[in-house]
C-alpha cells in the first residue's frame, strides 16, 4: 500500500534507531551483520540468532519474547488480533467475518484489511508511547480465521467466511494481501491464517479431541483456503490448532506442517501455536510424556512460536521446556535456530531493526485511526452484508410511515453488534439510533419484550454480602491489570468494601489517578429467597463472574455501559461464594453489582405497542455471549460456546409469535453469527432481514436496509437448515450430507441465497470454448440486466456440476463477482476459470481436472433456488492431476 501522508515516525523504529547508533551499541552488536540493511532479512536473522546464548534463544520461543539487552533487542509481544478490526481501543470495527462473507465483495475486504493494517500500525506506535507492551500492541495479527464452518452448531463459526472452501479462500486472500500491504520489502502487518487446518468444534473438547478426517475431505474441504492463503497471498504466518488430526496434534502434525505447509506449498514464514496448544501436546493429547518432549516434537515438526495464555506452564517458566528439550537431547539446538531465524526474519520485515526513513509504514498519519474514511467503509460493508431472506412487499418501509413498534432485546444494545474478537470503537450505532435517524418523522416505540438477552437488574442488597473473614461486604484487591483475566497481576492494595461497586467517589486514593487497573472482589452471598436469578455487573469494563467456583458470565467490555449477567439457582439461607473481576481502562471506574429474578415471559407492553403501530420491527437473535470460544453458558440450546439447537431461543420465539398475533405487518431482523432455523418466522413474518453481527455501523446499516436507502444484496455464506435433525453428529468431521456441496436434503435457505428490492435477468452465457483439454483455462461471459425499478447490486455466482466421478461435490461455487446495475441497464460480466477452479478431488483424495461433461451455471444464486440463472455445458477431453 502506497502512503502519501506525512506523520510522526513509528516510535519503535525511532527507539531502535537511537539504540542502533554506534555510540549506543553494546559490544556484542557492534558492526553486526543483522544491522546491515543491504543483506537479506534471512541472512540478517541468521546472524542475529547465531549470536544468542541457549537461554536467550529459549526466551524467544513464546509470544511474550524477552528482551536481549546485550544485543539491544527489545522485548516483543507477538499476540495481537484483528479479525474484523484491531483488538484495541478507539479503532474501527467492521462486521463480523460471517457478515463480511455475505458481502461477496473481495475488493471491499481487501480495502478493509488495508485500513486495519494502518490502524494496527498507529496503535503499535501509541502503545509503545504509553509503555504498554502487552498483548494487542504488536504488528503480527492472528487473523483471518479460514476454518470451514462445516456445522452451524460451532460457536466460533461467526469468525469464519462460511462453509464454502472457494469463497473462504477468496476472502482470505483479499484480507491477507490487504493487511500485509504491497511493499516488496516490508510488511504493513503480518497476517496469520488460523487454525491450521481441520478445526471447527466442539469447543469443550478442543484441547484433547483427535479428529478423524479422510484424505478426500482434508484436501477437498479443509485445506483449499489455507493453500490459497500461502501460495497466492503469501501469508507471513500460520497458526496451528488445538485438536489432533488423525492421531497427531495439529501443532506437532508431520503431514500438515511438514508435508503440506512447508513441502507442497513452500511456506517460508513462521508457525505460531494456538494458545496453550503446545502444552496440550503432552498434558492433554498425551502425544509425548513430558512438557520438554512435547515442546521438542512441536519445534521439530515446524512450530516456531508458542502462544501461552499465562506467564508460566504448570508453575515453571515457559522457556524451561526448550532448555530442557535441548539439554536432554530431544531437540537439536540447530532446530531451535531454524525456528528463531523465521521469527526474526518476520520482525526484520516489519521494519523493527531499520532506520525509520527506510520503512514506508512509519509515515502513517495518526489521524487515519478511526477516520471518517474507515467508518464510511465499515458502513458500506455493513450495508453490503445485509441479506433479505423474505419480503412480501412490506419492505422497504414507506417514507411517510407514522408509527413503528420496535420489539426484541437486541434493538437498543450495541455490544452484540460487534460480535467476538472485537476492539472498542469510539462510536457505535444501535438499531434504535439508526431507525430514529432514518425515520425522523415517525413515532417509534421500543419495548424489549423479554428479559432474555436484555440483562437488567437492581443493585444487589449489601446486607446479603459478607467478606471471607465474616464482615459485611466483600474483600477487594486492586491490581495493575486492566483486563479481568490477567494471570498474576501486581497487587496494589486490598481492603474490605460494602459491595462490588466502583465510582470516582469511592476509589482508594492510590487508585484514583490510574488510567488502567483491575479489581477482584471475593466473599459470600446469602440469599433471603430461593429461586433462579440473573446476577452480574453493569460496567464498561471487562468482567468475569464466578459463583461457587463456577464461571457464570464473562465480558470483554466496551465503550458503552452494559450489563453482563449469568444465571444461578440460589437457595434461601444457603451461603455461596462469589468472585468478581473487573478490568478498568481509560480511567472509567463505573461498575455496579446487580441481580434480578429470572422471568422470560413475554411483556404485554410489547404486544400493546405492536397493536397500535403501523409496522412492527422485531430485532431478535443470539449474541457472542451465547456462541463463542470455550465459554460458560447456562441457557437452553447452548453448551460451552457451541449450540445444541438451531432454533431461535424460545423466549424470543414466543415474543415474535405474540406480536405477529396482532396482525400488523411484521419484519424480523436477525442478529447472529450462525444459521438459525426460523421455520415459524419464515411462514408467518412479512419480511426477514439477516443482519449478522454488523459492526459499529450496524444499526445504521439495518435502518438503511429497512428504509430502502440500501438495496440489500448480501448472500448467505452458509446453509440455513431446518433443524439439527438434518445434520450428522457434531463431532463427525466427515463432509457427507454437510454444507450445500454435499447436503441432499431441503434446507430452509440455501447457501448463496438472498433477495433484492429489484429483479435481475440473465442471458447470453458464452464460454471461450465448450471443449478443452484438461489443464487449460476457460473464460465465461454473461449478460445481467436489472429488470426492476431501482438500482441495486447483484452477486453474480458461477457454479459447476461435475462429471460423475466419485468424490465430486453435488455442486460447487467456482467464481463470483458483485456488480451494481441501474434499472433497465444490462452489464456484461466475465469470469476466468483456471485449472484449479475446474478441479475436484477424487474419493481417494487426489486433486484432478476430470474428463467428462460439466454444467456451468451462472445466476443470482444456486441453480434451482428461485434466482434467475442460465447454464451451458463444458466438455473436458482428458484427465490431469493437480498439485496438492
Image (spheres, helix red, strand yellow):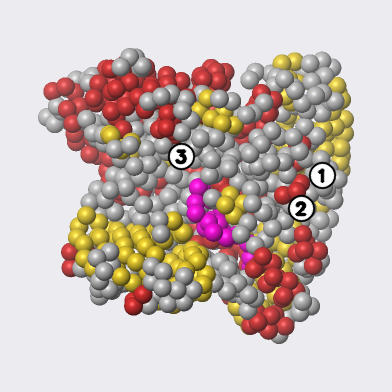
Calculate the distance from the C-alpha at mark 2 to the C-alpha at mark 1: 10 Å
Spot occupied by residue 750 in the image (x, y as percentages of width and height)? 77, 48
Residue 514 relative to residue 791: left or right: left
Residue at the (48%, 30%) spot, across then down: 285
Q: Mark 3 points at which residue?
A: 142
Mark 2 Cα-neighbour bin, 10 Å: few <14, some 14–19, many ≥20: many
Q: Which of 424 and 57 is in front in this view?
A: 57
* Main secondary structure along the magenta-highlighted residues: loop
Q: Which of 718 and 436 is in front in this view?
A: 718
Residue at the (63%, 39%) spot, across then down: 731
Q: Name the residue under label 1.
A: 745
Q: Do the residues labelled 3 and 1 touch (CB within 8 Å)?
A: no
The stretch drawn in magenta includes residue 4: no
Residue 370 relative to residue 10: left or right: right
Mark 3 residue element: loop
- Quadrant location of residue 322? top left
Calculate the distance from the C-alpha at mark 3 to the C-alpha at mark 1: 36 Å
Q: Earlier in the sequence, mark 3 or mark 1?
A: 3
Spot occupied by residue 754 in the image (x, y as percentages of width and height)? 74, 53
Calculate the distance from the C-alpha at mark 2 to the C-alpha at mark 3: 34 Å
- Quadrant location of residue 758? bottom right
Q: Give the range drawn in magenta.
A: 619-635
| In the image, residue 10 above or below residue 681 | above
Q: Name the residue under label 2.
A: 722
Amino acid at each position: 500500500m502506497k502512503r502519501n501522508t506525512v506523520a510522526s515516525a513509528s516510535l519503535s523504529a525511532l527507539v531502535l534507531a537511537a539504540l542502533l547508533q554506534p555510540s549506543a551499541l553494546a559490544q556484542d552488536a557492534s558492526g553486526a551483520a543483522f544491522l546491515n540493511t543491504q543483506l537479506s532479512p534471512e541472512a540478517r536473522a541468521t546472524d542475529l540468532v547465531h549470536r544468542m546464548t541457549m537461554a536467550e534463544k529459549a526466551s524467544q520461543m513464546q509470544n511474550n519474547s524477552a528482551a536481549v539487552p546485550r544485543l539491544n533487542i527489545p522485548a516483543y509481544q507477538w499476540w495481537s488480533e484483528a479479525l474484523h478490526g484491531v483488538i484495541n481501543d478507539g479503532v474501527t470495527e467492521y462486521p463480523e467475518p460471517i457478515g463480511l462473507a455475505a458481502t461477496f465483495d473481495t475488493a471491499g475486504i481487501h480495502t478493509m484489511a488495508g485500513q486495519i493494517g494502518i490502524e494496527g500500525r498507529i496503535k503499535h506506535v501509541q502503545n509503545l508511547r504509553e509503555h504498554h507492551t502487552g498483548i494487542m500492541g504488536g504488528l503480527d495479527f492472528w487473523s483471518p480465521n479460514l476454518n470451514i464452518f462445516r456445522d452451524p452448531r460451532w460457536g466460533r463459526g461467526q469468525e469464519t467466511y462460511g462453509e464454502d472452501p472457494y469463497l473462504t479462500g477468496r476472502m482470505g486472500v483479499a484480507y491477507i494481501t490487504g493487511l500485509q500491504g504491497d511493499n516488496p520489502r516490508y510488511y504493513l502487518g503480518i497476517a496469520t491464517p488460523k487454525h491450521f487446518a481441520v478445526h471447527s468444534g466442539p469447543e469443550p473438547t478442543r484441547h484433547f479431541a483427535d479428529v478423524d478426517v479422510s484424505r478426500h475431505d482434508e484436501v477437498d474441504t479443509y485445506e483449499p483456503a489455507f493453500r490459497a492463503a500461502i501460495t497466492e497471498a503469501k501469508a507471513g504466518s500460520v497458526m496451528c490448532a488445538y485438536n489432533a488430526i488423525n492421531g497427531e496434534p495439529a501443532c506437532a502434525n508431520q503431514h500438515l506442517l511438514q508435508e503440506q505447509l512447508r513441502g507442497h506449498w513452500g511456506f517460508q514464514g513462521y508457525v505460531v501455536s494456538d494458545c496453550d496448544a503446545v502444552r496440550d501436546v503432552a498434558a492433554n493429547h498425551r502425544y509425548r510424556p513430558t512438557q520438554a518432549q512435547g515442546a521438542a516434537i512441536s519445534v521439530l515438526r515446524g512450530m516456531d512460536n508458542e502462544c501461552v495464555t499465562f506467564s508460566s506452564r504448570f508453575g515453571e517458566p515457559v522457556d524451561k521446556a526448550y532448555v530442557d528439550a535441548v539439554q536432554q537431547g530431544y531437540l537439536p539446538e540447530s532446530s531451535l535456530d531454524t525456528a528463531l531465524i523465521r521469527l526474526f526474519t518476520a520482525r526484520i520485515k516489519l521494519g523493527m531493526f531499520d532506520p525509520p526513513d527506510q520503512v514506508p509504514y512509519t509515515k502513517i498519519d495518526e489521524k487515519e485511526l478511526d477516520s471518517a474514511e474507515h467508518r464510511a467503509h465499515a458502513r458500506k460493508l455493513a450495508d453490503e452484508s445485509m441479506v433479505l431472506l423474505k419480503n412480501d412487499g412490506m419492505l422497504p418501509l414507506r417514507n411517510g410511515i407514522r408509527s413503528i413498534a420496535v420489539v426484541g432485546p437486541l434493538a437498543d444494545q450495541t455490544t452484540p453488534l460487534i460480535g467476538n474478537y472485537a476492539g472498542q470503537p469510539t462510536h457505535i450505532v444501535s438499531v434504535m439510533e439508526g431507525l430514529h435517524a432514518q425515520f425522523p418523522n415517525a413515532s417509534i416505540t421500543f419495548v424489549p419484550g423479554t428479559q432474555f438477552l436484555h440483562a437488567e437488574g437492581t443493585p444487589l442488597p449489601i446486607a446479603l454480602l459478607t467478606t471471607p473473614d465474616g464482615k459485611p461486604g466483600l474483600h477487594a484487591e486492586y491490581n495493575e491489570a486492566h483486563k479481568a483475566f490477567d494471570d498474576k497481576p501486581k497487587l496494589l492494595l486490598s481492603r474490605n468494601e460494602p459491595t462490588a461497586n466502583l465510582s470516582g467517589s469511592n476509589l482508594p486514593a492510590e487508585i484514583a489517578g490510574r488510567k488502567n487497573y483491575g479489581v477482584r472482589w471475593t466473599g459470600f452471598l446469602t440469599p433471603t429467597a430461593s429461586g433462579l436469578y440473573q446476577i452480574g455487573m453493569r460496567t464498561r469494563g471487562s468482567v468475569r463472574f464466578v459463583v461457587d467456583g463456577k464461571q457464570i458470565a464473562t465480558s470483554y467490555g466496551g465503550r458503552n455501559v452494559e450489563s453482563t449477567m449469568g444465571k444461578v439457582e440460589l437457595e434461601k439461607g444457603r451461603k455461596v461464594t462469589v468472585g468478581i473481576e473487573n478490568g478498568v481502562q481509560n480511567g472509567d471506574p463505573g461498575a455496579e453489582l446487580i441481580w434480578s429474578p429470572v422471568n422470560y415471559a413475554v411483556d404485554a407492553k410489547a404486544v400493546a405497542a405492536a397493536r397500535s403501530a403501523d409496522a412492527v420491527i422485531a430485532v431478535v437473535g443470539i449474541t457472542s455471549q451465547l456462541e463463542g470460544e470455550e465459554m460458560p453458558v447456562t441457557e437452553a440450546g447452548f453448551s460451552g460456546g457451541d449450540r445444541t439447537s438451531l432454533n431461535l431461543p424460545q423466549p424470543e420465539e414466543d415474543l415474535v409469535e405474540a406480536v405477529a398475533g396482532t396482525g400488523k405487518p411484521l419484519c424480523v431482523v436477525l442478529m447472529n453469527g450462525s444459521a438459525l432455523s426460523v421455520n415459524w418466522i419464515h411462514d408467518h413474518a412479512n419480511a426477514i432481514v439477516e443482519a449478522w453481527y454488523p459492526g459499529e455501523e450496524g444499526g445504521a446499516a439495518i435502518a438503511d436496509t429497512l428504509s430502502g436507502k440500501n438495496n440489500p444484496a448480501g448472500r448467505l455464506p452458509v446453509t440455513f437448515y431446518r433443524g439439527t435433525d438434518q445434520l450428522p453428529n457434531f463431532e463427525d468431521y466427515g463432509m457427507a450430507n454437510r454444507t450445500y456441496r454435499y447436503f441432499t436434503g431441503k434446507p430452509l435457505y440455501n447457501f448463496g441465497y438472498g433477495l433484492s428490492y429489484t429483479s435481475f435477468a440473465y442471458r447470453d452465457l458464452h464460454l471461450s470454448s465448450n471443449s478443452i483439454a484438461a489443464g487449460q483455462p476457460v473464460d465465461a461471459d454473461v449478460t445481467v440486466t436489472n429488470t426492476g425499478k431501482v438500482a441495486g447490486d447483484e452477486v453474480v455466482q458461477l457454479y459447476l456440476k461435475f462429471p460423475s466421478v466419485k468424490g465430486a461435490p453435488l455442486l460447487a461455487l467456482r467464481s463470483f463477482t458483485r456488480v451494481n446495475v441501474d434499472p433497465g441497464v444490462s452489464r456484461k460480466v466475465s469470469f476466468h476459470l483456471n485449472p484449479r477452479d475446474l478441479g475436484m478431488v477424487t474419493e481417494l483424495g487426489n486433486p484432478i481436472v476430470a474428463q467428462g461433461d460439466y454444467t456451468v451455471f451462472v445466476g443470482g444464486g444456486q441453480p434451482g433456488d428461485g434466482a434467475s440463472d442460465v447454464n451451458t455445458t463444458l466438455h473436458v477431453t482428458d484427465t490431469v492431476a493437480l498439485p496438492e
